[in-house]
Structures are given as C-alpha cells and as structure tokens.
Image (cartoon, rainbow, N blue to C red):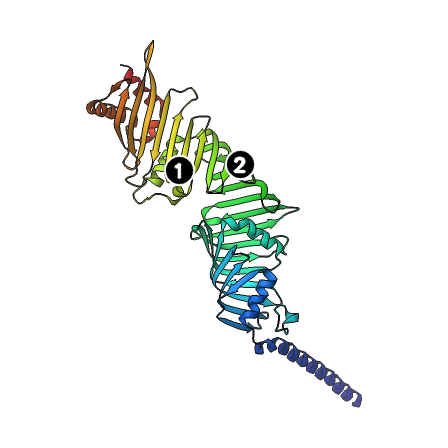
Amino acid sequence: MNKNFNFFFKKKSIYQIIFYLFFFLVVIFFSFFLIPFFFNYSPQLIEESFKINNNIKIQNISKISYKVLPTPRLKVSGSNLYLKENILKIDGSEIEIILNPGKILNYKKLYYKKIIINGGTTKINTNNINYLLNYFKKNKLKIFFKENNLTIIKNKISLFEINDGAIKISPTNKQQPLSINGTFLNHKIIFILDNKSGNKKNILIKIPKLDIFSNISLQNKDNFNFFSGLVNLEVLNNFFQFNFTREKNIEINKGFIRNNLISSSFEGEVALKPSFLLNLNFEPTILNMEKLFSIINKKYFSDEVKKPELINKINGLFVFKKMFYGDVTFQNGEILFKNFKKEVNSTSFFNAKITEFGKKGKIYFNILKVIQHRKSSSKNLKIAGFIVPHSSEIVFEKILFGKEKYTKKKIRNSEEKFKKEVIQKSLSNIFNDKKMNNFFNSFKY
C-alpha cells in the first residue's frame, strides 16, 4: 500500500516538473518574440537596410508596426519602392518584412530574406526587362506580391495590365523562380517561369477562359543580351509554332500557323527598338479568303466597332508568297495592300487602303488589269473606288481603259454590271476568279 502511494506521488512529481518546464519554455519563447514590440523601428533603419542589402529605395513610410504572427515581421504602410535605378516601381502598397527569428533582438540592424507587398501598383518598363532579370538573378531576396496591379509600359504608354496579381519572385528556387496569378482583360491568367538544366528555361502562359496556352523554351547567353528558343502558342483553334533568336532584333524562322482559315509557313524579323516593328514573310498552302473576309467584316466593320487599338500599335510589313502574292503594310494606324495578284505572272494587280473602321468604315481600292483587246494589242484597265463592308456597298469612282477616261454614266453602268454579275448578294464573290474574269473580259467588246 505504501509503495503504491509513494509511486503515485513520484509520478505526479515528474508530471509537475515536465509541466513547469514546458510552461517556462513557452514563457521564454513568447517573451523572446514579444520583446520587439518595445523597439522603436525607425524609417531610417528600414531605408538604410533596403538600400545596403538589396539596392532598393523606399520612401514615404507613414507607419511601422511589429507583428508576431504568423511569423515575426514588420508592417510598413504608405510606402513606395524603387528597385535599382528605378527599373521597377511599386507605389501605394503595404510591405511586410519577414524577419529572421534568430536575430530579431538586434534592433540596430534588420535581418530578412523575404518581403511581402500587399496591394498597390507595380510598373515595369519594357526597356528595363534585361536589367530587371539580371537584378533578380543576382539578388537573393524573395518578393511576394498580393492583390497587386502589374502594369507593363513602353515609352510612357501602357501596353497591358494584370490586376489583383499574386506574384512570387524566388531567386533561390531552382524550379519556379517567378510565378504570376492574376486577371488579364477580366480573365484569369497564369504565368510561370521554370528553370531547366544549364541556361535553359520554360515560360508557361495560360488564360483558360480564352483558351490561350503558350509554352516557350528559352536558352539565354550573355546576360539576356542574346537568347534563342522555340514558341508553341494555342489561341482558341489557332496554333502557332516558330523558332527564334534575339540579339539586336528577334529573328523568326521555321514558323508555322494553322487554323480553319489558313495553313502557312512564315519567317521574318521583329524589332523592339526604337519602336515595335514586324517584317514577316508568309507562304500559305491553304487560305479560305471568303470566310476570312466574312470574319473581318463582322469583327472590324460592325455597328459599334471603332478603330482597334492594336492597329495603332502595329507597324510592319507582311509579304505573301504562294497561292497569291502581295504586301500588307501597317503604318501609322493605316493598313495598305500593295500589288496583290493571284499568280507570279498575273496581269491583274489589286491595291487598297483601310483608314476607317466600324459601320462607316471604307476600303479604298484600285485595280489594274492588262486586257488583251485584240490579237496584236493590249490595254490597261484601271478602276478606282471604295467598298463599304458593313452595307456590302461598292462604288466605282474612276475608270480608265487604255487612253479612254470613262464618263460618269459609263462608270455607273460598269458599276451596276459588277454588282449584278460579280457581287450579287455577297462581297466575298470578289474572290471568285470565274466571276471576276467574266467581268474583265466584257471590256474586250
């Protein structure tokens, strides 16, 4: 009886010792992390630490507070961040500085390896992309963004925005050093940069609701001044693939595009400086011109359409070979079609200009056709006018056949003949070779 009684008290004593020891450790633990509540973290301390450790300039700090949960951190309100010579600007955000738990009692110096940026706006200039990538490559600071608006700009012009972004920049992560989740044009977008072996990287871009998926295999040398890679891009039912190299400009080769309208190879060059410029050569093997014209009509010449912003931003030249030949030039918000013909040795040439879009939009054109008038002679037929795609209206303004300049009456007669025998009920019939040739042949008589 006495032995059992003594054993009970000895066991109880052991439990008490363990409890007191645990309580003591908990008190010490919380005291350790609560002490920084009494520190006076000055804006100057944070500014100097960011400048020395990460070459980051921080300004306009309105409030600094210490939080112990979920991990020890400083919350800095009302601040603006500028990374190394303003290659990245972050305005109007709240910053959480995740402190090193083992060194939080050192109130004269900040020790941290990660910051969280809540809210605000981040601006990146495309001219600084290379410097920015090099900065993150050399700097080991992890940066997380929450509900941040990311704006990409070029020459003070906003190119696109990703809203409510959750961005993770983790230079020490060998698999995914950069990931972005946000909203682009009211649709969810996912961007992931994956590291592969050597200097190889994969860039994944997904916009599920728009059925957009892109996989870019990238190999870089010379600190991003030279790189090459392969692009696979799917947009709805459109598939693009091409190889590229980039030094001063982007050279594209072995390109291919396929959808239910066109199947074509392409190659060329893309210049980014001093302005965005495209020069591409296409060799289509399949092209449904009638269906393409119908889509363009609905998309760019309907009631509510204004000039698409993309047209104002694109400058360049598209050269078509095979199936048909000609140049399409995008210049200062205008689209020019030059010397289009069906075959290399064709005697028909088509030129056009588009400057207006929407319901009142017009396509101004002129046609040159060499007509064998007699066995020993030929005449040039020149027709100038415009098309109103929305209303399927076509107007001839001038006709010159050889040296004869048609009168207004003869122009109207030819116009009515063209509408009756070629256009009929659809503008797409201008791509009907048989109807067009029958119309041209009527000038022989």
User: What residue is disc 2 on?
Assistant: 252
- Label placed on residue 331: 1
- N-terminal of the pair, mark 1 or mark 2, is 2
Which of these two is toward me, 179 or 428? Answer: 179
Helix, strand or loop status at disc 2: strand
For residue 215, above or below residue 26: above
Helix, strand or loop status at disc 1: strand
Which quadrant is the C terminus positioned in?
top left
Q: Residues within 10 Å of mark 1 (few under 14, many from 20)?
A: some
* Outermost right residue: 3
> Is residue 114 visible from the viewing direction of this image?
no
Q: Nearer the viewer, mark 1 or mark 2?
A: 1
* Outermost bottom residue: 2
Image coords of residue 173 (percent x, y): 63, 55
Q: Is residue 265 left or right of residue 177?
A: left
Count how many numbered circles sit on residues in the image. 2
Q: How much space separates mark 1 and mark 2, taking CA atoms?
A: 21 Å
* Outermost left residue: 409
Image coords of residue 3 (percent x, y): 80, 88
> Is residue 327 visible from the viewing direction of this image?
yes
